[in-house]
Amino acid sequence: MKVFEELRASFARGITRPLSWRIEQLKAIEAFLTENESLIIEALKKDLGKSKAEAWNTEVGFLLKDVRHTRKNLKRWLKPRKVSTPAVAKPGRSKLLLEPLGTVLIMGAWNYPMQLSLSPLIAAIAAGNTAILKPSEVSANSARIMHEILTQYLDPEAVAVLNGDASLATELLQLPFDHIFYTGGNRVGKIVMRAAAEHLTPVTLELGGKSPVLVSKKSDIKVTARRIAWGKWMNAGQTCIAPDYVLVEKEAYQPLVDALLQSIKDFYTDDPQRSKDYGRIINEQHFRRLLTLMDGQTLINDSDFDRSELYIKPLLVDNPASDSAIMQEEIFGPLLPIIRVDSFQQGIDFVRQREKPLACYAFSNDKAEQADVEHQISTGNLCINDTMMFMLNDKLPFGGVGNSGMGRYHGEFGLRTFSHEKPVMTRSFHLDVALRYPPFSSQKLKWLKKLM
Protein backbone atom coordinates (compact mmCIF):
# COMPACT_ATOMS: atom_id res chain seq x y z
CA MET A 1 0.00 0.00 0.00
CA LYS A 2 1.50 3.29 -1.14
CA VAL A 3 0.49 5.37 1.88
CA PHE A 4 2.04 2.80 4.22
CA GLU A 5 5.35 2.87 2.36
CA GLU A 6 5.34 6.68 2.38
CA LEU A 7 4.80 6.80 6.13
CA ARG A 8 7.58 4.28 6.70
CA ALA A 9 9.90 6.40 4.59
CA SER A 10 8.96 9.48 6.61
CA PHE A 11 9.76 7.67 9.84
CA ALA A 12 13.09 6.50 8.44
CA ARG A 13 13.97 10.13 7.61
CA GLY A 14 13.40 10.97 11.28
CA ILE A 15 10.82 13.73 10.79
CA THR A 16 8.75 12.58 13.78
CA ARG A 17 11.58 12.33 16.30
CA PRO A 18 12.10 15.98 17.35
CA LEU A 19 10.13 17.03 20.41
CA SER A 20 9.19 20.23 18.57
CA TRP A 21 7.46 18.24 15.80
CA ARG A 22 5.48 16.19 18.31
CA ILE A 23 4.37 19.27 20.20
CA GLU A 24 3.25 20.98 16.98
CA GLN A 25 1.15 17.97 16.01
CA LEU A 26 -0.46 17.84 19.45
CA LYS A 27 -1.27 21.55 19.16
CA ALA A 28 -2.80 20.81 15.75
CA ILE A 29 -5.12 18.19 17.26
CA GLU A 30 -6.13 20.68 19.94
CA ALA A 31 -6.85 23.27 17.25
CA PHE A 32 -8.92 20.74 15.29
CA LEU A 33 -11.04 20.03 18.36
CA THR A 34 -11.61 23.65 19.33
CA GLU A 35 -12.14 25.09 15.85
CA ASN A 36 -14.50 22.33 14.75
CA GLU A 37 -16.35 21.70 17.99
CA SER A 38 -19.80 22.39 16.55
CA LEU A 39 -19.18 20.16 13.51
CA ILE A 40 -17.95 17.32 15.72
CA ILE A 41 -20.93 17.60 18.05
CA GLU A 42 -23.30 17.67 15.08
CA ALA A 43 -21.69 14.52 13.66
CA LEU A 44 -22.02 12.73 17.00
CA LYS A 45 -25.68 13.74 17.13
CA LYS A 46 -26.25 12.24 13.68
CA ASP A 47 -24.33 9.05 14.46
CA LEU A 48 -25.52 8.28 17.99
CA GLY A 49 -28.07 10.88 19.01
CA LYS A 50 -25.63 12.31 21.56
CA SER A 51 -26.66 15.48 23.30
CA LYS A 52 -24.37 18.49 23.13
CA ALA A 53 -23.38 18.08 26.78
CA GLU A 54 -22.65 14.37 26.47
CA ALA A 55 -20.75 14.82 23.21
CA TRP A 56 -18.59 17.52 24.72
CA ASN A 57 -17.96 15.74 28.03
CA THR A 58 -17.16 12.30 26.64
CA GLU A 59 -15.53 13.21 23.34
CA VAL A 60 -14.38 16.80 22.72
CA GLY A 61 -13.70 17.75 26.32
CA PHE A 62 -12.14 14.39 27.13
CA LEU A 63 -9.76 14.70 24.19
CA LEU A 64 -8.85 18.31 24.96
CA LYS A 65 -7.92 17.26 28.49
CA ASP A 66 -5.91 14.34 27.10
CA VAL A 67 -3.97 16.31 24.50
CA ARG A 68 -3.23 19.21 26.85
CA HIS A 69 -2.05 16.87 29.60
CA THR A 70 0.19 15.06 27.11
CA ARG A 71 1.63 18.26 25.67
CA LYS A 72 2.31 19.69 29.12
CA ASN A 73 4.15 16.62 30.40
CA LEU A 74 5.73 15.18 27.24
CA LYS A 75 9.21 16.64 27.70
CA ARG A 76 9.41 15.24 31.23
CA TRP A 77 8.06 11.84 30.21
CA LEU A 78 10.66 11.52 27.46
CA LYS A 79 13.64 12.17 29.71
CA PRO A 80 15.93 9.12 29.90
CA ARG A 81 15.50 7.25 33.17
CA LYS A 82 18.78 6.59 34.94
CA VAL A 83 19.26 3.22 36.59
CA SER A 84 22.11 1.86 38.67
CA THR A 85 25.08 -0.01 37.20
CA PRO A 86 26.51 -3.12 38.90
CA ALA A 87 30.02 -3.00 40.29
CA VAL A 88 31.36 -5.45 37.71
CA ALA A 89 30.35 -3.03 34.90
CA LYS A 90 31.91 0.10 36.44
CA PRO A 91 33.07 2.61 35.46
CA GLY A 92 29.91 3.01 33.42
CA ARG A 93 26.37 4.33 33.47
CA SER A 94 22.98 2.87 32.54
CA LYS A 95 19.67 4.35 31.44
CA LEU A 96 16.34 3.55 29.82
CA LEU A 97 15.54 5.54 26.69
CA LEU A 98 12.09 5.80 25.11
CA GLU A 99 12.14 5.51 21.34
CA PRO A 100 9.23 5.40 18.86
CA LEU A 101 8.21 2.04 17.43
CA GLY A 102 7.83 3.14 13.80
CA THR A 103 4.65 3.12 11.73
CA VAL A 104 1.53 2.12 13.67
CA LEU A 105 -2.08 1.28 12.86
CA ILE A 106 -4.98 2.58 14.98
CA MET A 107 -8.42 1.08 14.42
CA GLY A 108 -11.14 3.11 16.14
CA ALA A 109 -14.57 2.15 17.42
CA TRP A 110 -18.01 3.55 16.61
CA ASN A 111 -19.48 4.08 20.07
CA TYR A 112 -17.12 6.93 21.00
CA PRO A 113 -15.82 7.56 17.50
CA MET A 114 -13.70 10.63 18.25
CA GLN A 115 -12.38 9.63 21.66
CA LEU A 116 -11.47 6.05 20.76
CA SER A 117 -9.73 7.13 17.55
CA LEU A 118 -7.92 10.27 18.64
CA SER A 119 -6.84 9.32 22.16
CA PRO A 120 -4.55 6.53 20.91
CA LEU A 121 -3.46 8.80 18.03
CA ILE A 122 -2.40 11.44 20.57
CA ALA A 123 -0.27 8.81 22.31
CA ALA A 124 1.21 7.52 19.04
CA ILE A 125 2.21 11.01 17.89
CA ALA A 126 3.59 11.91 21.33
CA ALA A 127 5.79 8.83 21.12
CA GLY A 128 7.15 9.97 17.73
CA ASN A 129 5.52 7.45 15.40
CA THR A 130 3.96 7.80 11.99
CA ALA A 131 0.40 6.48 11.97
CA ILE A 132 -2.51 5.29 9.90
CA LEU A 133 -5.86 5.90 11.58
CA LYS A 134 -8.86 3.90 10.41
CA PRO A 135 -12.04 5.18 12.10
CA SER A 136 -15.05 2.89 12.27
CA GLU A 137 -17.19 3.15 9.16
CA VAL A 138 -20.29 2.50 11.31
CA SER A 139 -20.14 6.04 12.76
CA ALA A 140 -19.94 7.47 9.24
CA ASN A 141 -20.37 11.17 10.02
CA SER A 142 -17.59 11.23 12.60
CA ALA A 143 -15.32 9.21 10.31
CA ARG A 144 -15.90 11.69 7.49
CA ILE A 145 -14.85 14.63 9.68
CA MET A 146 -11.63 12.87 10.67
CA HIS A 147 -10.87 12.01 7.06
CA GLU A 148 -11.77 15.36 5.52
CA ILE A 149 -10.95 17.90 8.25
CA LEU A 150 -8.53 16.40 10.77
CA THR A 151 -6.09 15.58 7.97
CA GLN A 152 -5.90 19.27 7.10
CA TYR A 153 -4.36 19.94 10.52
CA LEU A 154 -1.81 17.13 10.71
CA ASP A 155 1.45 16.52 8.86
CA PRO A 156 0.46 14.45 5.79
CA GLU A 157 3.93 12.93 5.67
CA ALA A 158 3.36 11.36 9.08
CA VAL A 159 -0.36 10.77 9.63
CA ALA A 160 -3.02 9.36 7.31
CA VAL A 161 -6.74 8.81 7.95
CA LEU A 162 -8.26 6.10 5.78
CA ASN A 163 -12.01 5.48 5.60
CA GLY A 164 -13.44 2.18 4.48
CA ASP A 165 -15.24 -0.98 5.47
CA ALA A 166 -14.01 -4.39 6.61
CA SER A 167 -12.20 -4.97 3.31
CA LEU A 168 -9.94 -1.99 4.00
CA ALA A 169 -9.28 -3.27 7.52
CA THR A 170 -8.35 -6.67 6.08
CA GLU A 171 -5.96 -5.05 3.61
CA LEU A 172 -4.32 -2.98 6.35
CA LEU A 173 -3.87 -6.00 8.59
CA GLN A 174 -1.70 -7.67 5.95
CA LEU A 175 0.94 -4.94 6.33
CA PRO A 176 3.97 -5.19 8.66
CA PHE A 177 3.08 -2.40 11.09
CA ASP A 178 5.26 -1.83 14.13
CA HIS A 179 2.22 -1.79 16.42
CA ILE A 180 -1.54 -2.28 16.03
CA PHE A 181 -4.02 -0.65 18.38
CA TYR A 182 -7.57 -1.99 18.07
CA THR A 183 -10.70 -1.00 19.98
CA GLY A 184 -13.80 -3.10 19.45
CA GLY A 185 -15.27 -6.54 19.97
CA ASN A 186 -13.71 -9.81 20.97
CA ARG A 187 -14.41 -11.56 17.65
CA VAL A 188 -12.56 -8.98 15.53
CA GLY A 189 -9.90 -8.70 18.22
CA LYS A 190 -8.95 -12.33 17.56
CA ILE A 191 -8.77 -11.61 13.82
CA VAL A 192 -6.45 -8.65 14.49
CA MET A 193 -4.21 -10.72 16.72
CA ARG A 194 -3.96 -13.58 14.21
CA ALA A 195 -3.05 -11.16 11.43
CA ALA A 196 -0.48 -9.39 13.63
CA ALA A 197 1.15 -12.72 14.46
CA GLU A 198 2.17 -13.14 10.81
CA HIS A 199 4.57 -10.18 11.24
CA LEU A 200 5.20 -10.62 14.99
CA THR A 201 3.58 -7.22 15.40
CA PRO A 202 2.73 -6.25 18.99
CA VAL A 203 -0.92 -5.38 19.62
CA THR A 204 -3.03 -3.42 22.04
CA LEU A 205 -6.57 -4.78 22.21
CA GLU A 206 -9.33 -2.88 24.01
CA LEU A 207 -12.20 -5.35 23.82
CA GLY A 208 -14.85 -4.81 26.47
CA GLY A 209 -16.98 -7.65 27.80
CA LYS A 210 -19.59 -7.88 30.55
CA SER A 211 -18.73 -5.35 33.26
CA PRO A 212 -20.50 -6.36 36.49
CA VAL A 213 -21.83 -4.25 39.35
CA LEU A 214 -21.92 -5.65 42.89
CA VAL A 215 -24.28 -3.91 45.30
CA SER A 216 -24.11 -4.60 49.03
CA LYS A 217 -26.97 -4.04 51.42
CA LYS A 218 -24.41 -1.87 53.22
CA SER A 219 -24.56 0.78 50.48
CA ASP A 220 -26.17 4.16 50.13
CA ILE A 221 -28.81 2.81 47.77
CA LYS A 222 -30.04 6.15 46.43
CA VAL A 223 -26.55 7.35 45.48
CA THR A 224 -25.66 3.88 44.20
CA ALA A 225 -28.67 3.88 41.87
CA ARG A 226 -27.90 7.35 40.49
CA ARG A 227 -24.31 6.41 39.77
CA ILE A 228 -25.27 3.11 38.13
CA ALA A 229 -27.92 4.86 36.02
CA TRP A 230 -25.44 7.56 34.96
CA GLY A 231 -22.87 4.99 33.85
CA LYS A 232 -25.35 2.60 32.26
CA TRP A 233 -27.52 4.91 30.14
CA MET A 234 -24.89 7.36 28.97
CA ASN A 235 -24.72 6.93 25.18
CA ALA A 236 -27.80 4.67 25.50
CA GLY A 237 -25.65 2.00 27.11
CA GLN A 238 -23.25 1.78 24.16
CA THR A 239 -20.10 2.07 26.27
CA CYS A 240 -17.48 -0.67 26.65
CA ILE A 241 -17.22 -0.02 30.41
CA ALA A 242 -20.94 0.56 31.02
CA PRO A 243 -22.47 -1.51 33.83
CA ASP A 244 -23.57 -4.67 32.04
CA TYR A 245 -25.48 -6.38 34.85
CA VAL A 246 -26.09 -5.87 38.59
CA LEU A 247 -25.64 -8.42 41.37
CA VAL A 248 -27.48 -7.12 44.44
CA GLU A 249 -28.02 -8.66 47.85
CA LYS A 250 -31.65 -9.72 48.09
CA GLU A 251 -32.38 -7.39 51.02
CA ALA A 252 -31.40 -4.41 48.85
CA TYR A 253 -33.07 -5.62 45.64
CA GLN A 254 -36.38 -3.74 45.80
CA PRO A 255 -34.91 -0.50 47.20
CA LEU A 256 -32.33 -0.53 44.40
CA VAL A 257 -34.92 -1.22 41.69
CA ASP A 258 -37.14 1.59 42.99
CA ALA A 259 -34.18 3.98 43.11
CA LEU A 260 -33.06 3.03 39.58
CA LEU A 261 -36.55 3.65 38.20
CA GLN A 262 -36.59 7.01 39.96
CA SER A 263 -33.15 7.87 38.58
CA ILE A 264 -34.31 7.09 35.03
CA LYS A 265 -37.25 9.44 35.55
CA ASP A 266 -35.04 12.13 37.11
CA PHE A 267 -32.49 11.96 34.29
CA TYR A 268 -34.69 11.45 31.25
CA THR A 269 -38.28 12.33 32.39
CA ASP A 270 -41.26 9.99 32.07
CA ASP A 271 -40.68 9.92 28.31
CA PRO A 272 -36.96 9.33 27.59
CA GLN A 273 -37.66 9.36 23.85
CA ARG A 274 -38.27 13.10 24.09
CA SER A 275 -35.34 13.79 26.39
CA LYS A 276 -32.55 15.78 24.75
CA ASP A 277 -30.06 13.92 26.94
CA TYR A 278 -30.87 10.36 25.86
CA GLY A 279 -29.15 8.86 22.83
CA ARG A 280 -30.07 6.38 20.11
CA ILE A 281 -28.86 2.96 18.95
CA ILE A 282 -26.15 3.22 16.30
CA ASN A 283 -27.94 1.29 13.51
CA GLU A 284 -30.69 -1.15 12.58
CA GLN A 285 -28.46 -4.20 13.04
CA HIS A 286 -27.71 -3.38 16.67
CA PHE A 287 -31.34 -2.36 17.26
CA ARG A 288 -32.50 -5.84 16.14
CA ARG A 289 -29.78 -7.50 18.22
CA LEU A 290 -30.97 -5.75 21.37
CA LEU A 291 -34.61 -6.66 20.76
CA THR A 292 -33.51 -10.28 20.37
CA LEU A 293 -31.71 -10.14 23.74
CA MET A 294 -35.04 -9.10 25.32
CA ASP A 295 -36.85 -12.20 24.02
CA GLY A 296 -38.18 -14.36 26.86
CA GLN A 297 -37.00 -11.96 29.57
CA THR A 298 -39.08 -10.48 32.38
CA LEU A 299 -38.96 -6.70 32.29
CA ILE A 300 -39.32 -4.72 35.50
CA ASN A 301 -40.52 -1.60 33.70
CA ASP A 302 -42.65 -1.43 30.56
CA SER A 303 -40.76 -1.70 27.29
CA ASP A 304 -40.89 1.08 24.74
CA PHE A 305 -39.04 1.31 21.44
CA ASP A 306 -39.31 3.07 18.12
CA ARG A 307 -37.62 1.48 15.13
CA SER A 308 -37.89 4.65 13.03
CA GLU A 309 -35.72 6.53 15.55
CA LEU A 310 -33.63 3.52 16.65
CA TYR A 311 -34.88 4.28 20.16
CA ILE A 312 -35.04 1.83 23.05
CA LYS A 313 -35.91 3.17 26.49
CA PRO A 314 -33.81 2.36 29.59
CA LEU A 315 -35.00 -1.07 30.70
CA LEU A 316 -34.47 -3.22 33.80
CA VAL A 317 -34.48 -6.99 33.27
CA ASP A 318 -35.48 -9.15 36.24
CA ASN A 319 -33.21 -12.04 37.23
CA PRO A 320 -32.33 -13.51 33.78
CA ALA A 321 -30.99 -17.06 33.66
CA SER A 322 -27.20 -17.17 33.71
CA ASP A 323 -27.14 -19.19 30.48
CA SER A 324 -29.47 -16.82 28.59
CA ALA A 325 -28.16 -14.74 25.68
CA ILE A 326 -28.45 -11.52 27.64
CA MET A 327 -26.07 -12.95 30.26
CA GLN A 328 -23.69 -14.54 27.76
CA GLU A 329 -23.19 -11.63 25.35
CA GLU A 330 -22.00 -8.09 26.02
CA ILE A 331 -25.24 -6.10 25.98
CA PHE A 332 -23.91 -2.78 24.64
CA GLY A 333 -27.28 -1.13 24.93
CA PRO A 334 -29.87 0.21 27.42
CA LEU A 335 -30.90 -3.16 28.96
CA LEU A 336 -29.78 -3.74 32.57
CA PRO A 337 -30.24 -7.17 34.18
CA ILE A 338 -30.76 -7.10 37.96
CA ILE A 339 -29.85 -10.38 39.68
CA ARG A 340 -30.51 -11.17 43.33
CA VAL A 341 -27.77 -12.89 45.35
CA ASP A 342 -27.85 -14.23 48.89
CA SER A 343 -24.63 -12.49 49.93
CA PHE A 344 -22.02 -10.05 48.69
CA GLN A 345 -19.52 -12.92 48.54
CA GLN A 346 -21.89 -14.90 46.30
CA GLY A 347 -21.81 -11.96 43.91
CA ILE A 348 -18.00 -11.99 43.92
CA ASP A 349 -18.03 -15.74 43.22
CA PHE A 350 -20.47 -15.19 40.32
CA VAL A 351 -18.06 -12.72 38.70
CA ARG A 352 -15.00 -14.91 39.28
CA GLN A 353 -16.62 -17.84 37.48
CA ARG A 354 -16.77 -15.80 34.26
CA GLU A 355 -14.34 -14.10 31.88
CA LYS A 356 -12.30 -11.26 33.34
CA PRO A 357 -14.18 -7.99 32.71
CA LEU A 358 -12.86 -4.71 31.37
CA ALA A 359 -14.38 -2.92 34.35
CA CYS A 360 -15.90 -4.01 37.64
CA TYR A 361 -17.97 -1.84 39.98
CA ALA A 362 -18.70 -2.49 43.64
CA PHE A 363 -20.88 -0.47 46.00
CA SER A 364 -20.43 -0.94 49.72
CA ASN A 365 -19.65 1.09 52.83
CA ASP A 366 -18.03 -1.96 54.39
CA LYS A 367 -14.21 -1.83 54.24
CA ALA A 368 -13.92 -5.61 54.42
CA GLU A 369 -16.25 -6.03 51.43
CA GLN A 370 -14.29 -3.43 49.50
CA ALA A 371 -11.08 -5.31 50.26
CA ASP A 372 -12.67 -8.61 49.18
CA VAL A 373 -13.46 -7.14 45.76
CA GLU A 374 -9.97 -5.65 45.40
CA HIS A 375 -8.24 -8.94 46.20
CA GLN A 376 -10.58 -11.52 44.68
CA ILE A 377 -11.68 -10.09 41.32
CA SER A 378 -9.29 -9.75 38.38
CA THR A 379 -10.48 -6.92 36.14
CA GLY A 380 -9.04 -4.35 33.78
CA ASN A 381 -10.30 -1.48 35.95
CA LEU A 382 -11.95 -1.50 39.36
CA CYS A 383 -14.13 1.33 40.68
CA ILE A 384 -15.60 1.23 44.17
CA ASN A 385 -18.75 3.24 44.94
CA ASP A 386 -19.03 4.75 41.46
CA THR A 387 -19.00 3.87 37.76
CA MET A 388 -16.57 4.93 35.01
CA MET A 389 -15.03 7.82 37.00
CA PHE A 390 -11.54 6.30 36.77
CA MET A 391 -11.51 7.48 33.15
CA LEU A 392 -11.03 11.04 34.41
CA ASN A 393 -7.77 10.29 36.24
CA ASP A 394 -4.75 10.86 33.98
CA LYS A 395 -2.59 8.94 36.45
CA LEU A 396 -4.55 5.71 35.98
CA PRO A 397 -4.09 3.54 32.88
CA PHE A 398 -7.04 2.14 30.95
CA GLY A 399 -7.00 -1.37 29.52
CA GLY A 400 -8.28 -4.91 29.78
CA VAL A 401 -7.04 -8.21 31.11
CA GLY A 402 -7.64 -11.70 29.78
CA ASN A 403 -10.68 -11.82 27.52
CA SER A 404 -11.30 -8.08 27.90
CA GLY A 405 -8.06 -7.12 26.16
CA MET A 406 -4.36 -6.49 26.57
CA GLY A 407 -2.21 -3.39 26.84
CA ARG A 408 -3.12 -0.04 28.32
CA TYR A 409 -3.08 3.67 27.53
CA HIS A 410 -4.07 7.21 28.65
CA GLY A 411 -1.49 9.80 29.64
CA GLU A 412 2.04 8.52 30.12
CA PHE A 413 0.81 4.93 29.79
CA GLY A 414 -0.21 5.63 26.19
CA LEU A 415 3.19 7.10 25.41
CA ARG A 416 4.84 3.94 26.71
CA THR A 417 2.47 1.69 24.75
CA PHE A 418 3.68 3.28 21.50
CA SER A 419 7.36 3.35 22.55
CA HIS A 420 10.20 0.92 23.05
CA GLU A 421 12.01 1.43 26.33
CA LYS A 422 15.55 0.85 25.13
CA PRO A 423 18.20 -0.11 27.71
CA VAL A 424 21.49 1.76 27.16
CA MET A 425 24.79 1.12 28.93
CA THR A 426 27.83 3.33 28.29
CA ARG A 427 31.22 2.21 29.60
CA SER A 428 34.62 3.84 29.98
CA PHE A 429 37.82 2.52 28.41
CA HIS A 430 39.49 2.98 31.80
CA LEU A 431 39.98 0.16 34.27
CA ASP A 432 39.70 -2.71 31.85
CA VAL A 433 39.97 -5.34 34.59
CA ALA A 434 41.33 -8.73 33.50
CA LEU A 435 38.97 -10.48 35.92
CA ARG A 436 36.30 -10.91 33.24
CA TYR A 437 38.58 -12.43 30.59
CA PRO A 438 39.86 -15.98 30.13
CA PRO A 439 41.81 -17.85 31.22
CA PHE A 440 39.76 -18.30 34.40
CA SER A 441 41.04 -19.51 37.75
CA SER A 442 39.34 -20.46 40.99
CA GLN A 443 40.40 -17.08 42.40
CA LYS A 444 38.88 -15.19 39.48
CA LEU A 445 35.63 -17.16 39.88
CA LYS A 446 35.56 -16.35 43.59
CA TRP A 447 35.79 -12.61 42.88
CA LEU A 448 33.23 -12.76 40.05
CA LYS A 449 30.75 -14.40 42.41
CA LYS A 450 31.24 -11.57 44.88
CA LEU A 451 30.94 -8.78 42.29
CA MET A 452 27.96 -10.12 40.37
Image (spheres, helix red, strand yellow):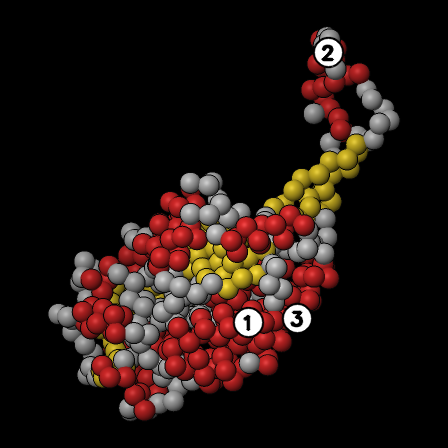
Please report contact status of discs 2 and 1: CB closer than 8 Å, yes or no: no
Task: Out of 49 and 86, give the one closest to the viewer.
Answer: 49
Nearer to us of marks 3 and 1 is 1
Nearer to us of marks 2 and 3 is 3
Mark seen at residue 438: 2
The residue at the far front in this view is 2
User: Residue 231 at what x, y percent from top left?
Assistant: 40, 74
Question: In the rendered image, which residue does mark 1 sit on?
Answer: 150
Residue 222 vertical position relative to residue 362 in the rendered view, above or below: below
User: Residue 247 at what x, y percent from top left?
Assistant: 29, 66
Pick whichever of labels 2 and 1 is earlier in the sequence.
1
| CA distance separating discs 2 and 3 | 57 Å
Question: Which secondary structure lies at badge 3?
Answer: helix
Query: What residue sits 73% from the left and 36% below the top?
Result: 425
Q: As shown in the figure, which amino acid type bears the numbered disc 3?
A: Lys
Nearer to us of marks 2 and 1 is 1
Residue 165 vertical position relative to residue 306 in the rendered view, above or below: above
Pick whichever of labels 2 and 3 is earlier in the sequence.
3
Which quarter of the figure is the C terminus placed in?
A: top right
Question: In the rendered image, which residue does mark 3 sit on?
Answer: 27
Determine which quarter of the picture holds residue 339: bottom left
Horizontal side of 306 relative to 417 (left or right) equals left
Determine which quarter of the picture holds residue 298: bottom left
Residue 56 vertical position relative to residue 160 in the rendered view, above or below: below
Classify mark 2: residues with Cα within 10 Å, few (<14), some (14-19) or many (20+): few
Q: As shown in the figure, which amino acid type bears the numbered disc 2?
A: Pro
| CA distance separating discs 2 and 1 | 61 Å
| CA distance separating discs 3 and 1 | 12 Å
